[in-house]
Amino acid sequence: DVKVTQSSRYLVKRTGEKVFLECVQDMDHENMFWYRQDPGLGLRLIYFSYDVKMKEKGDIPEGYSVSREKKERFSLILESASTNQTSMYLCASSFRYGYTFGSGTRLTVV
Amino acid sequence: RKEVEQDPGPFNVPEGATVAFNCTYSNSASQSFFWYRQDCRKEPKLLMSVYSSGNEDGRFTAQLNRASQYISLLIRDSKLSDSATYLCVVIPNQAGTALIFGKGTTLSVSS
């Protein structure tokens, strides 16, 4: 089975900190995605990547950046964390239509 | 109009009931459709794909109506373990494009 691993299950950071959320997949998938999920808003796409060093903005990229230096790793970066970035962050990878999600990182910014 | 819309529920049904969820999508060029299931505090997992001809997997039946741009999921003989949030998911155009999620419909099955 494809495994998508997110480095942290729970994270607490202070306002203004630079935050790195890491995601690693083990099936050589080309496509990787970052979503955030909030009550009443559902899953919203932040960024995605079709290949190494490629990135595309999703619906809500403001305040975020990404890095994909290796095929298996897709990092989400909060340049200066703010309280409105408190959320559940979900990483996914896919080949064609087979999407697999990581177990999520619940980030709290205080 | 939002890209993918679902009735949020919650749907509260007794065990053994039949329950149906509907979902509408706005992009008529959308190519692929899915239902995902998400348990509380867990990640979404693929439940089933949705094909134009309709498809069935045990107690679950999915239907796609392209003309009306809606997708349905029917659950027969509901079990307690079916309690979850069901997410309608659309891929707007081609393979590899990001999934577009509905906000989900919450189902609670009680004994």
Image: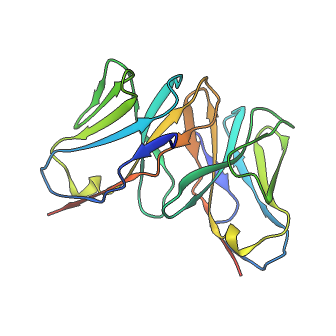
Q: Position of residue B95 (x, y in %)?
A: 61, 24
Residue at 22% across, 38% down: B59
Q: Quadrant for residue B18, please give it.
A: top left
Assign the C terminus of chain B to one quadrant of the image: bottom left
The residue nearer to you, when weighing A29 against B41, is B41
Q: Is residue A80 left or right of residue B104?
A: right
Q: Is residue B61 left or right of residue B49?
A: left
The residue nearer to you, when weighing B53 against A70, is B53
The residue nearer to you, when weighing A47 against A2, is A47
Q: Position of residue A98 (x, y in %)?
A: 55, 32
Image height check: is B49 above or below B42?
above
Residue A63 showing in the rendered view: yes
Q: Position of residue A54 (x, y in %)?
A: 83, 36
Counting labels gives: 0
Residue at 65% across, 29% down: B96
Q: Is residue B52 left or right of residue B76?
A: right
Image height check: is B59 above or below A7?
above
Residue A106 showing in the rendered view: no
Q: Position of residue B106 (x, y in %)?
A: 34, 56
Image height check: is B64 above or below A9?
above
